[in-house]
């Protein structure tokens, strides 16, 4: 009887030790998680004094604060960020909009919000609602602006605009100023982005116009395909919980979404 009791105690103690270690492992925060991003397409991500702000920046920071101790932030031109992130396991990337081309290149952790995409023009120039409207652009400029590495760069190919110039840039602020000063005919852009830079530059908001929403960017937090399943699982749990909170609703409201 003593032997059975001793064996039970050993098994019980071993079980408790295993459970304690597993619980500790599940609650130990990750450190120095590499985050690849750009703050040249605000307000998706804003970097202030090495701190994450903006819609996706604050979402990521707030939703994972109990599981990620700190991020190593790589603030790069957007096209380069999409290249560099693939060099590291368990690295994250924001802001990442889902496209057919990107679908198989990342793990898609959570959809944070949608951003309508338009060809923005300024009054009194006509609105753009179709390919025909694009073909009628002022021939003196005959130019559309868009962010290099963005979904608009991929989508605009559908219009087959062989006789229209494309002004690529890695900086949305630069593109917004070109539109305001009539140096391009239109800017193919996310709504929240162009409105942010319009307001930042104190341009007249009544001048800005969207003729038609051609599609919506589904903005996600992304991770590398090689990332550990356990790492992804834990982060997704925390993000899913945060998305159900009032704090998440207030974050969207803060940025006019």
Image: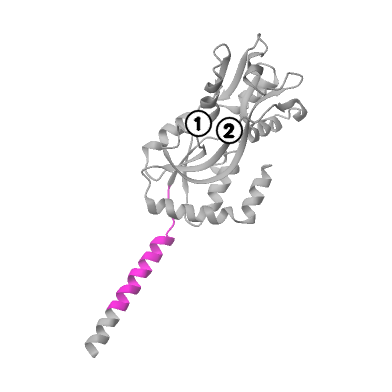
Q: Position of residue 169 (x, y in %)?
A: 55, 23
In front: 210, or 198?
210
For mark 2, give the secondary structure.
loop
Q: Position of residue 199 (x, y in %)?
A: 71, 33
The image quadrant that residue 138 belongs to is: top right
Outermost left residue: 3
Q: Is residue 235 left or right of residue 118?
A: left
**How would you rate the neighbour count of disc 2 (Cα within 10 Å): few for under 14, some for 14-19, many for 20 or more?**
many
Majority secondary structure in the magenta region: helix
Residue drawn at x 39%, y 37% as measured from the top left: 86
- Which residue in the protein does label 2 denote? 41
Picture quarter with the C terminus = top right
The image quadrant that residue 34 belongs to is: top left
Residue drawn at x 67%, y 28% as measured from the top left: 212
Q: Is residue 16 magenta?
A: yes
**How would you rate the neighbour count of disc 1 (Cα within 10 Å): few for under 14, some for 14-19, many for 20 or more?**
many
For mark 1, give the secondary structure.
helix
Instruction: Indicate which disc, 1 or 2, sits on the residue closer to the N terminus.
Output: 2
Instruction: Tell me which segment is drawn in magenta.
Output: 11-32
Proximity of marks 1 and 2: CB atoms separated by less than 8 Å = yes
In front: 133, or 139?
133
Q: Is residue 111 above or below residue 209?
A: below
- Which residue in the protein does label 1 denote? 78
Q: Position of residue 67 (x, y in %)?
A: 47, 56
Q: Is residue 198 magenta?
A: no
């Amino acid at each position: 009887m003593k032997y059975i009791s001793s064996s039970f105690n050993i098994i019980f103690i071993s079980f408790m030790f295993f459970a304690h270690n597993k619980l500790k492992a599940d609650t130990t925060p990750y450190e120095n998680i590499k985050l690849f991003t750009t703050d040249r397409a605000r307000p998706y991500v804003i970097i202030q004094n090495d701190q994450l702000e903006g819609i996706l920046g604050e979402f990521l920071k707030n939703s994972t604060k109990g599981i990620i101790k700190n991020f190593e932030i790589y603030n790069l031109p957007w096209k380069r960020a999409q290249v560099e992130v693939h060099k590291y396991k368990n690295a994250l990337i924001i802001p990442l909009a889902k496209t057919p081309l990107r679908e198989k290149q990342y793990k898609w952790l959570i959809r944070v919000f949608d951003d309508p995409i338009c060809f923005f023009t300024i009054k009194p120039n006509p609105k753009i609602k179709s390919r025909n409207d694009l073909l009628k652009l002022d021939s003196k400029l005959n130019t559309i602006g868009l962010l290099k590495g963005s979904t608009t760069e991929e989508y605009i190919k559908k219009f087959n605009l062989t006789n229209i110039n494309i002004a690529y840039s890695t900086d949305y602020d630069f593109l917004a100023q070109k539109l305001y000063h009539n140096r391009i005919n239109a800017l193919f852009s996310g709504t929240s982005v162009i409105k942010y830079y319009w307001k930042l530059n104190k341009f007249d908001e009544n001048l800005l116009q969207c003729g038609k929403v051609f599609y919506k960017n589904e903005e996600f937090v992304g991770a590398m395909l090689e990332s550990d399943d356990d790492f992804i699982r834990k982060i997704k749990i925390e993000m899913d919980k945060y998305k159900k909170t009032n704090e998440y609703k207030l974050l969207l409201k803060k940025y006019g979404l």
